[in-house]
Amino acid sequence: MAFEGLADRLQSTIKKITGKGKVSEQDVKEMTREVRLALLEADVNFKVVKDLIKRIKERAVGQEVMESLTPGQQVIKVVKEELTALMGGEQSKIAVSDRPPTVIMMVGLQGAGKTTTSGKLANHLRKKHNRSPLLVACDVYRPAAIKQLETLGEQLSMPVFSQGTEANPVDIATEALAKAKEEHNDYVIIDTAGRLHVDTDLMDELEQIKAKVKPDEIFLVVDAMTGQDAVNVAESFNEQLDITGVVLTKLDGDTRGGAALSIKAVTDKPIKFAGMGEKLDELEAFHPERMASRILGMGDVLSLIEKAQENVNEKQVKELEEKMRTMSFTFDDFLEQMGQVRKMGPLDDLISMLPGANKVKGLKNAQLDEKQISQVEAIIQSMTKQERQEPEVINASRKKRIAKGSGTTVSQVNRLLKQFSEMKKMMKQMTNMQKGKKGKGMNF
Ligand code: GDP
């Protein structure tokens, strides 16, 4: 889970101060000392930590805290605002050229996730902004890179412009632009070559492409898990190419957060996107405030709602409500509902967006039991159509068959049946209450 280690430490530090009705200078001193250590341990750049702590200290012993009615919470607010500012403050949007196509050049070291991110970004632009991008394969040194981009294009049903490994990358990029104009592609995403280390040949080539295609954005793709190395890479690329933004990949596996917290402060270039997994829809626009919220255990309810809106079909929700009201909710509906929740992503990712989730024992490391969920699905799938509609008809021998068919045990089948029947009972009570049945004494 992203930032887990850092989040754990910061949360236990701030918990000590949150409820305080009075905050002394000594309290602030202790808190900032612990925050400082947590950030250094998370591999945040030393100078960045020093400046940040200085600002937090100044503000935390200043008027805004001392004169507030809830000084403890006010200190946390200061920490959150400073972490947000550190990561760039406002969300930094992607450029839109007034003379399309908008050209985005993707640069970065080999293995950082450049090619995958090119595909993810194309997918994002189409899905979220209704655009039609053209992907361009300019990494002619690694034959597999061209193939990889073409495969991504196929998976996404999106055009990929390539001219094999013999052509010159500057020419490929130039011709791709002409092609995009012809085909009315409004974005061009150029996947350039990467090396294991920053070297002058690579930079020369990238500079030539830049001079020729005059990109609206140059996104540096860096691997968040490499911590301060990612920050150093960002500094070199920025010096040479004057990048416009950073895409931090593999944030899903980065428990420390050092790169995310240092890059903006060191390069003065914003993080625009974060890669949260290998799949093509696992790219998120980077929101500094939401990220700070997550780190401090305040949750990220806004992202959770956005995910729900993207993945849950409103018509189905309405139908479900109707079914609950009329008590015709069946195992089929249950299965469908589970499918919708799963579409939103791995459950432990979703849970990490809930406020305070880190603190709830059992939720953490729960790996929210994807296995258990698959078993529930398998049990329902092993039922007949009739059984899914009227589970009461399931007798002992059928239970045995269902358990066998789903690779589970009879007691697991029994448990599910019991839970389902209890859930229906609860729905009944709720609908009765909503109808305002006399004698219940509750008004909604
Ligand atoms: P390139 O050499 O920079 O083009 O890197 P690739 O696009 O080939 O990616 C290298 C590896 O990183 C691949 O196995 C990707 O699936 C993986 N990868 C890329 N982005 C992410 C991410 O956000 N999360 C995770 N977990 N893996 C990623």
Image: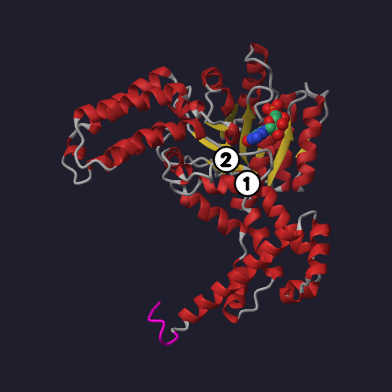
Nearest to N terminus: mark 2 or mark 1: 1
**Residue, disc 2:** 365
Q: Is residue 154 left or right of residue 71?
A: right
Secondary structure mostly seen in the magenta stretch: loop
Determine whether 111 is above or below 347 in the image. Answer: above
Of 73 and 262, the residue lying toward us: 73
What secondary structure is marked by label 1?
helix
Q: Residue 59: in sight, yes or no? A: yes
Residue beneath the point at 78% across and 72% down: 395
What secondary structure is marked by label 2?
loop
**Residue, disc 1:** 124
Q: Determine whether the beta carbon of the residue marked 2 sits less than 8 angstroms from the nearest atom of ligand 1.
A: no
Q: CA distance from mark 2 to mark 1?
A: 30 Å
Which mark is nearer the camera, 2 or 1? 2
Determine whether 233 is above or below 341 in the image. Answer: above
Q: Position of residue 340 (x, y in %)?
A: 65, 59
Q: Determine whether the beta carbon of the residue marked 1 sits less than 8 angstroms from the nearest atom of ligand 1.
A: no
**Rendered-image quarter of ligand 1:** top right
Q: Which residues are magenta?
A: 437-444
